[in-house]
Amino acid sequence: MVRNDRVARPSRLKYLHAVLQLEEPLPDPIRYQLLHRTASAILTAQLFHAQVAIMLVQSFSPVERWRDDFLMFSQALGALPVSDAVVPVHRHNAPRLFVGWCTGDQRFREVDLRAAV
């Protein structure tokens, strides 16, 4: 069975907004993947009765590709993002939510995994 995305998308977005405790819709350019991954961190924390949820983006891009999208998302949640740091989202508190961006070591982009075995 194939779902019609135009029909399912509004209900998925409404659910994600509820999980993220958002009272207003986020700006349209916000990437769905950031919403989904952050909601997943919250739901997983709740499942395991954890007091903290963290959504961390690890980027291996040499030019910090999509960092602006992360900054816009973090600010829309009410967080003040800092490079290579995990920061609290003060409006979310059950569990406490943190978001962060970290930059991966560029040397690991060039590793030949076959040679490592």
Image: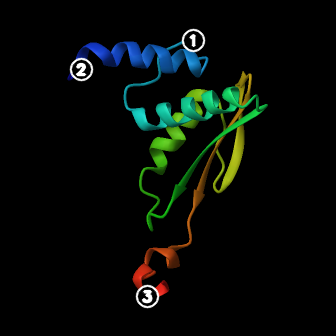
| Image mark for residue 3 | 2
Q: Which numbered disc, 1 or 2, marks the residue that appears first in the sequence?
A: 2
Q: Secondary structure at mark 1?
A: loop
Determine the image quadrant of residue 46. Answer: top right
Structural distance between the alpha carbons of marks 1 and 2: 27 Å
| Image mark for residue 23 | 1
Q: Secondary structure at mark 3?
A: helix
Q: Which residue type carries mark 3?
A: Ala
Tell me which residue sits at (45%, 74%) in the image.
Answer: 109
**Of 72 and 114, the residue lying toward us:** 114
Q: Which numbered disc, 3 or 1, marks the residue that appears first in the sequence?
A: 1
Residue 44 position in % (x across, y down): 63, 32
**Cβ–Cβ under 8 Å for marks 3 and 1:** no
Q: Which residue is mark 3?
A: 115
Residue found at the far bottom of this picture:
115
Q: Residues within 10 Å of mark 3 (few under 14, many from 20)?
A: few
